[in-house]
Image (cartoon, grey):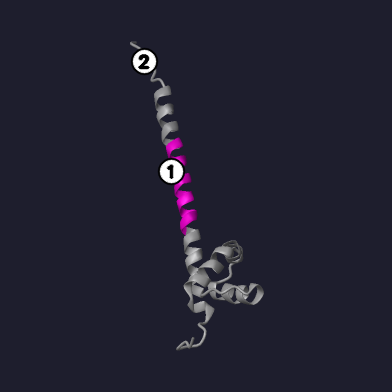
Amino acid sequence: MIHNHGPSNPIALVGHRQRSRKNHEALVAKLSDAGNPARVLKLFIKREHGVIMKSKDIYNLLWRRGLAERRVMNQAERAINSLKTTDSRSSMTSKRIPAASNQ
């Protein structure tokens, strides 16, 4: 069978990048924690691990990771605020106001 073009570059195929991305999310997270920008991560991952990723893929992974961390933080903040509210309510009801003396 004759095809009308040569083989596509693997980076152009989203399916290849998605499989690659799923396997290397932890690596991207670890390297980004060291303060490396996405373009450096892309070059390092390609050179050292042969992973096909675009800078945009890395930015998206980092954004999703940040979003997940913010969700966890918001849940923790809500729990802390709930405890503070409960604590302040219980301290308000436990304090007794002394009766005024008639002198």
Amino acid type at circle 1 is: Arg
Residue 96, located in which quarter of the rendered image?
top left
Picture quarter containing residue 89? top left
Q: Looking at the image, which residue is at 45% across and 46% down?
A: 75
Give x and y (percent) for residue 43.
59, 77
Q: Quadrant of the C terminus?
A: top left
Q: Residue 24: percent from the left, percent from the top?
A: 59, 65
In this rendering, is residue 39 above or below 86? below
Marks 2/1: CA–CA distance:
38 Å
Q: Nearer the viewer, residue 34 or 102?
A: 34
What residue do we see at 55% from left, 72% from top?
A: 37
- Element class at badge 2: loop
Which residue is more in the foreground, 72 or 101? 72
- Position of 91 with respect to 16 (left or right) is left
User: Where residue 101 sits: x, y (%)?
Assistant: 36, 12
Q: Residue furthest right?
A: 48
Q: Check residue 78 in the rendering and tell me which mark sits there, or answer none.
A: 1
Q: In this picture, which residue range is highlighted in magenta? A: 67-83
